[in-house]
Amino acid sequence: MTSTMTVETVTVRGRRLAYADSGGPGLPVLALHGHFGRARAFAGLAAALAPEFRVIALEQRGHGLSAHDDDMSPDAYVADAAAFVRARGLGPLVLLGHSMGGVVAFRLAARHPELARALIIEEAGALNRRPEVAHPVLDVRDWPRRAPTLGELRRQVEARGIPDASYFLESAVERPDGWGFLFDHEDMVRSQEALIGDWWPDWLATNCPTLLLHGLDSFVLPTSMAREMAERRPATTLREFPGCGHWLHDDDPAGFAAAVREFLTAL
């Protein structure tokens, strides 16, 4: 985490949720990470948008420093985020989400339209199932629980077919018995399985201004689906990023931040 954001915790719906806040009087943007992610994934964006915009990144249940829970359903994520926005007195605000967080964001807008001023959706599809999405679940149940060093943890994860484990290692911490992940392996599989489904009704339920960001090399969101999402939903602008994949905010951080800033400024 860079110095542009401070990490705090709040009790929401009876559970502890962590969040990172860039602070300031700027237009608030609630940022929601994807599976395996952390709030600090948005630190670079927060720095690029300051001071005109304030980024509040929520660590969703079962992720990062937030409490674990047996219920890892999309409805639970939406309810947490809505309660968090109300508890902090933030709405209506811009909802930004990556991957699973993107689905949570547009489902939150559909269920609580009074909280959503606009949407920024990065690499989240309206349909998440085979055959449209080749691999909707990354099975991590055989990933290491502990490794003697961070480097060894990386080696063991990458030995399981992950080309670059950097994204996942953002959730790695050192404990007395070695390095391990903050997330629970079984929780992540259950959460991904719960996200399999048809989310078109939620995507089409709102018409607030929306920016849809898509990496043309993505293995998660097919380009044909991204274009259909933009065509079928009013007030939706699609921005495609050549040479970028599912984590386009890492593949092209400057381009990602510029697209987000342009959209926010136009609001």
Image (tube, grey):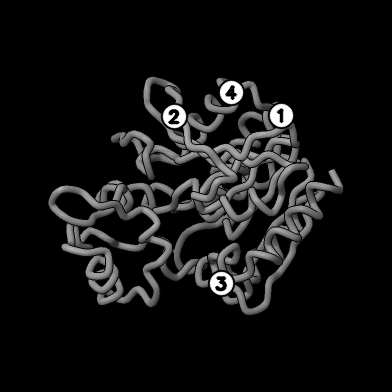
Q: Earlier in the sequence, mark 1 or mark 3?
A: 1
Q: In the image, what residue occupies the spot 56% across and 65% down?
A: 250
Q: Residues within 10 Å of mark 1 (few under 14, many from 20)?
A: some
- Mark seen at residue 92: 1
**52 shown above or below 163:** above
Q: Which residue is mark 2?
A: 9
Three-letter amino acid code of the residue under disc 2: Thr
Three-letter amino acid code of the residue under disc 3: Gly
Quarter holding the C terminus? top right
Q: Which residue is mark 4?
A: 88
Where is residue 29? Give x, y as percent. Answer: 67, 40
Image quadrant in which you'd find residue 94: top right
* Secondary structure under the numbered disc 2 in the rendered image: strand
Q: Tally the numbered discs.
A: 4
In the image, which is nearer the foreground, mark 1 or mark 4? 4
Using the numbered discs, state the Cα–Cα distance from disc 1 to disc 3 in whole angstroms. Answer: 30 Å
Image quadrant in which you'd find residue 246: bottom right
Three-letter amino acid code of the residue under disc 4: Arg
Q: Earlier in the sequence, mark 4 or mark 2?
A: 2
Q: Which residue is mark 3?
A: 245
In the image, which is nearer the foreground, mark 1 or mark 2? 2
